[in-house]
């Protein structure tokens, strides 16, 4: 039986669009600057923010989603995120009291996770105008939440001019004192962001440029000056230990190498999946289908992550040596798993709904992939046919954007039964051969870690050395 004992805190917005994501990037950068080993989680399928936080923290960022994970699975994800870390920073989703249809609790996912894991919440509110209304709204939200430790708040987007800033701080702290609340944990002036932050969700149309190191250093400097980091750490340390009943963390020794696509064109995934692959014995080796001439030596599996296929299609298909290598890897019996838009990359061709062909694909999946309109939906699934992910009606849940579809398929097995809210059941999970599995969806392997174990076993068949 394991124990979750790492200091942790949830950064949650009092309302929408309070600048929470930018603030979290600055806090994590500042913690790293101080030599603190920080691990990050995001609530909900915020893949692009998770990718940015992974680049800063140099650790996999776990997605916590009560829509598809049960309480035990959520605790496992947070426990794995905390291994070897000094603190876990959890970026919340939506607002303190934002409810979702399938969750039976008062409040939103942030409140639910705080109650489940006894994690303190640090609320962030926009103080750019109507300070009294913002504070009243914050106080109203806090009064409606029970059983959760609410820390001192961070006021964001205050005036940049020094006298105005000091006056605003004094007014807000006096109001908090009257309401019996502690003074502000942070008072952050409005930050002019020269670069576009990634959108939430699973938009695979266009890649948002990575945030520059220069801007992150400037952001870290603002946080160091305006947020009481020591008090933030002290609040995180108040999170008590939580027992994980019936769970023992006993990773196995390395059994295989799995190449994972990570470059400008790829990199969207549940990063928890990689943690589970490592747990079951995989050595994770990043590679670039855009820039590398071939696969890493000795790999037995390929994990092609979601990404921005149509934006980078020309560059991808110009890399003839990588295409030859992946095809040779398949011919030799290597395991290939592709999700999101990378499933279209495996097809004979992929094109837009207007019929214009973007490019010929790898030809491993004998079908045409057609781009359509996106609409994020959660689904409950099961693996019906034998594949590299398993069989025997193995349950697995995830999310789909519905932005790609198979057209003109030749004969091949469909392994995944998906039941989606408001849509019904459909068959997906394309397996043209015993060692290939492609899906336009994103499966959260934390909902059934046996899937990761099966992928490791399938990737232990060969050690690829083609060049």
Image: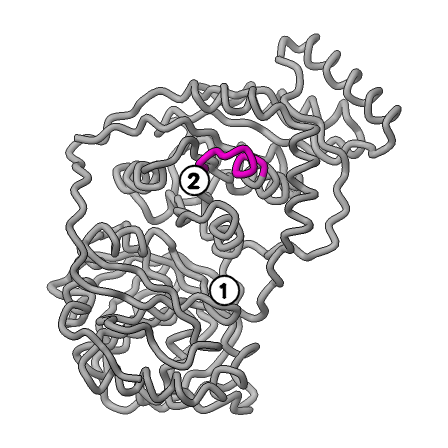
Crowding near the residue tagged with mark 1, few <14, some 14–19, many ≥20 C-alpha atoms within 10 Å: few
**Residue 200: percent from left, percent from top:** 55, 54
Picture residue at 57% right of the left edge, 41% below the top: 29
**Residue 329: percent from left, percent from top:** 26, 82
Q: Is residue 209 magenta?
A: no
Task: Please state the extent of the stretch shown in magenta in the rendering.
Answer: 30-40
Label 2, on which residue?
A: 39
Picture residue at 35% right of the left edge, 20% below the top: 240
**Residue 367: percent from left, percent from top:** 35, 88
Say which quarter of the image contains residue 181: top right
Seen in the picture, residue 57 relative to 107 is either above or below; the reply is: below
Residue at mark 2 to residue at mark 1: CA–CA distance: 30 Å
Picture residue at 41% right of the left edge, 26% below the top: 7
Seen in the picture, residue 379 relative to 241 is either above or below; the reply is: below
Which of disc 1 and disc 2 is earlier in sequence? 2
Nearest the eye: 31 or 248: 31
User: In the image, 463: left or right of 336?
Assistant: left
Picture residue at 16% right of the left edge, 30% below the top: 1
Label 1, on which residue?
A: 375
């Amino acid at each position: 039986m394991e124990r979750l004992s790492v200091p942790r805190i949830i950064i949650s917005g009092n309302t929408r669009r309070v600048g929470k994501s930018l603030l979290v990037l600055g806090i994590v950068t500042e913690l790293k600057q101080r030599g603190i080993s920080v691990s990050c989680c995001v609530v909900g399928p915020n893949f692009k923010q998770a990718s940015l936080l992974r680049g800063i923290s140099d650790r996999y960022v776990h997605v916590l989603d009560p829509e598809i994970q049960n309480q035990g699975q959520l605790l496992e994800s947070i426990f794995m995120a905390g291994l070897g870390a000094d603190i876990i920073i959890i970026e919340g989703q939506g607002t303190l009291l934002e409810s979702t249809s399938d969750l039976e609790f008062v409040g939103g996912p942030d409140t639910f996770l705080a109650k489940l894991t006894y994690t303190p919440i640090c609320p962030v509110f926009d103080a750019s105008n109507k300070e009294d209304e913002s504070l009243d709204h914050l106080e109203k939200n806090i009064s409606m939440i029970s059983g959760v430790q609410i820390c001192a708040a961070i006021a964001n987007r205050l005036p940049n001019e020094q006298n105005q800033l000091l006056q605003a701080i004094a007014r807000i702290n006096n109001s908090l004192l009257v309401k019996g609340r502690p003074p502000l944990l942070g008072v952050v002036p409005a930050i002019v962001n020269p670069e576009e932050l990634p959108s939430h969700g699973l938009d695979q149309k266009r890649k948002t440029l990575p945030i520059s190191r220069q801007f992150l250093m400037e952001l870290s400097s603002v946080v160091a000056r305006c947020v009481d980091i020591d008090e933030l750490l002290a609040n995180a340390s108040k999170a008590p230990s939580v027992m994980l009943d019936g769970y023992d963390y006993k990773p196995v020794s390395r059994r295989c190498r799995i190449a994972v696509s990570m470059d400008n064109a790829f990199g969207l995934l549940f990063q928890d999946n990689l943690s589970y692959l490592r747990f079951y014995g995989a050595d994770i080796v990043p590679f670039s289908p855009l820039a590398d001439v071939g696969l890493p030596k000795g790999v037995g599996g390929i994990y092609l992550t979601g990404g921005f296929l149509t934006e980078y299609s020309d560059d991808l298909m110009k890399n003839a040596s990588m295409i030859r290598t992946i095809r040779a890897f398949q011919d030799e019996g290597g395991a290939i798993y592709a999700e999101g838009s990378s499933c279209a990359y495996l097809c004979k061709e992929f094109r837009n709904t207007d019929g214009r062909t973007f490019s010929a694909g790898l030809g491993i999946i004998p079908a045409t992939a057609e781009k359509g309109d996106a609409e994020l939906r959660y689904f409950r699934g099961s693996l019906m046919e034998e594949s590299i992910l398993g069989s025997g009606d193995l349950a697995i849940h995830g999310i789909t954007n519905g932005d790609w579809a198979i057209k003109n398929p030749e004969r091949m097995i469909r392994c995944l039964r998906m039941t989606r809210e408001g849509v019904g059941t459909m068959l997906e999970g394309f397996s043209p051969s015993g060692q290939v599995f492609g899906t336009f969806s994103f499966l959260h392997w934390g909902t059934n870690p046996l899937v990761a174990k099966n992928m490791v076993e399938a990737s232990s068949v060969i050690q690829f050395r083609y060049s």
